[in-house]
Image (cartoon, rainbow, N blue to C red):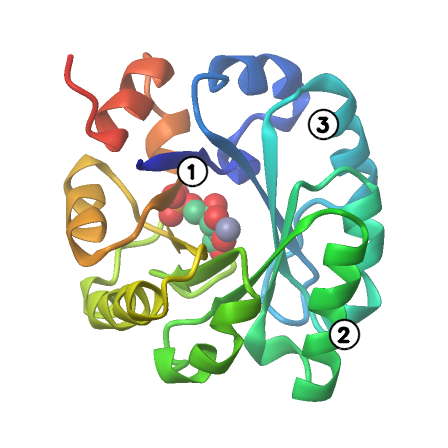
Amino acid sequence: MIKIAPSILSADFTNLGADMESIKTADYLHFDVMDGIFVPNISIGIPVLESVRKRTDMFLDVHLMIDKPHRYVKRFAEAGADLVVFHLEADQPQDIYPALEEIKACGKKAGLAIKPKTPGELLLPYLPLLDLALVMTVEPGFGGQKFMADMMPKVRLLRKAIEDQGLACELEVDGGVNPETAKVCIEAGANVLVAGSDVFKAQDRAGRIALLRGDRA
Ligand code: DX5
Ligand code: ZN
């Protein structure tokens, strides 16, 4: 089943409750955390996550774009994330394994993300431990960028590894997803699609989510 995860990075933060309500037919709510160090932008963090958690039962997919995420994964898990995803490039291997364990010890799902320049092969050793693998289809940091179709071989590689090993790991793409590029991602093997600007700029957000998912009208 294809899942759509609208990114609230594209929401109006003065109107966040209503914007969350407008995307409630989606499968996940994608929550982008940026620290101005791992990526050249700063977004939202723990207090906003706590408020969002109180307001919705939606599955909260928290994407940490922060340096040395092992320092914070537990706090995001406790603040209400259902899934905590952090970047492979942001920590040392000796810190990555304990961070994944720490998330799971909180009873939450754990995932790893890779930036466009990171080969998919680097994620392979971690796949059996992951609930979700995230392939960035833009350079992380900003919404509204152009989709990088050249990431699709990476999606195919990871989908094949997941299938070959019979893993339960979900495969997510993030960046530049619209109805056209969504089809390309699904065809390559992604099953969770993050979409920020495309969903939030739509008048009919529920209709847009259904379109991205490929639901029949
Ligand atoms: C980018 C973020 C994305 C972003 C996607 O660094 O991780 O989740 O919100 O935005 P769009 O869908 O507009 O490319
Ligand atoms: Zn994201």
Please say if 216 is above or below 109. Answer: above
Percent from the top left, x then y, of residue 187? 15, 51
* N-term-proximal mark, 3 vs 1: 3
Q: Quadrant of residue 167?
A: bottom left
Percent from the top left, x then y, of residue 168? 44, 55
Q: Label for residue 32?
A: none
Q: Label for residue 98?
A: 2
Count residues near mark 1 (Cα–Cα under 10 Å), then give few for <14, some for 14-19, many for 20+.
many
Q: Nearer the viewer, mark 2 or mark 3?
A: 2
Percent from the top left, x then y, of residue 13? 64, 27
Please say if 68 is above or below 140. Answer: below
Tell whether 211 sits left or right of 175: left
Q: 145 or 18, which lies in front?
A: 18
Q: In which quarter of the image is residue 178?
A: top left
Q: Name the residue under label 3.
A: 52
Q: 23 or 11, which lies in front?
A: 23
* N-term-proximal mark, 2 vs 3: 3
Ligand 1 within 8 Å of disc 1? The answer is yes
Tell whether 36 sits left or right of 26: right
Instruction: Give the Cα separation between the discs numbered 3 and 1.
Output: 17 Å
At 28% across and 21% down in the image, what residue appears?
210
- Please name the amino acid that badge 3 sits on: Val
Percent from the top left, x then y, of residue 172? 40, 53
Q: Name the residue under label 1.
A: 196
